[in-house]
Amino acid sequence: MYGQNTIEEVRIVKDDKQIDDLFSEIGSNELKLDILDILSQPALQITYEKINDPYSSFGADVFLNFNDTNTSRSWSDNFALTPFYRFYFFDKRDYGGSGFFAEVFSKFSFGESEVQYYYGLNNPNIEPYIEVEEENFFDVALGAAIGQKWVNKKGWTFELSLGFGRYLFVKDPEQLLGGPQIDSFRPTGTGRGGFSIGKRF
């Protein structure tokens, strides 16, 4: 028999209906801003994410690069659109659409890349020289990422993520018949990730 002052610890485990109710309270749409891009480049990346259910979501990033020069720091992209699909793995105390996640993504990139033309490499009658040009490009990458998201009761979110994708249309250096050797300095892969702050609605 318990005494009058006995306190029993009660642990409440939320079932799927309770999780769905909490999930509905803070909304299933999310807008977020990548802080890392703003501080390091500068660039702007805005993400819309639709929480499909407590366990999955889909959305897209829009990336705008404000760098004046083409460097590895600017990823060589001027504009990129990145659709993604995510799978969430979370503790049942959370609101859904949060916790650890894994995603697959595609990236559609528009940008500028340095191209070098090497003349006279195989012609003893011409002194070798190099011409450098900036060329516009379009490419598509496929990749995957992992990350962690936290959501508070007001619907504010904080997210860390890291991933990698590979471009599909990058060419190896080529030698034109009777012409120069061409080397492009476009990256073969693309990084994905950052530190984002967002809001559910």
Image: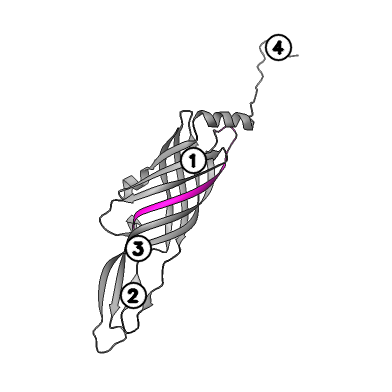
Q: Which residue is mark 3?
A: 137
Q: Is residue 15 left or right of residue 116?
A: right
Q: Nearer the viewer, mark 3 or mark 2?
A: 3
Q: Is residue 198 magenta?
A: no
Residue assigned mark 2: 182
Tell me where residue 82 appears, x and y as whole percent: 43, 51
Q: Which residues are magenta?
A: 77-94
Residue under label 1, please give it.
Answer: 50
Give, as a three-letter code, the residue at label 4. Gly
Q: Name the secondary structure under disc 2.
A: strand
- Residue shown at 36% from the left, 65% from the top: 186
SS for dot 1: strand
Q: Position of residue 198 (x, y in %)?
A: 42, 37
Label 3: few (<14), some or many (≥20) within 10 Å?
A: some
Mark 4 secondary-structure assignment? loop
Label 2 sits on what residue type?
Ile
Confirm whether the magenta stretch covers residue 83: yes
Residues at discs 3 and 4 in contact (Cβ within 8 Å): no
Mark 3 vs mark 2: which is more N-terminal? 3
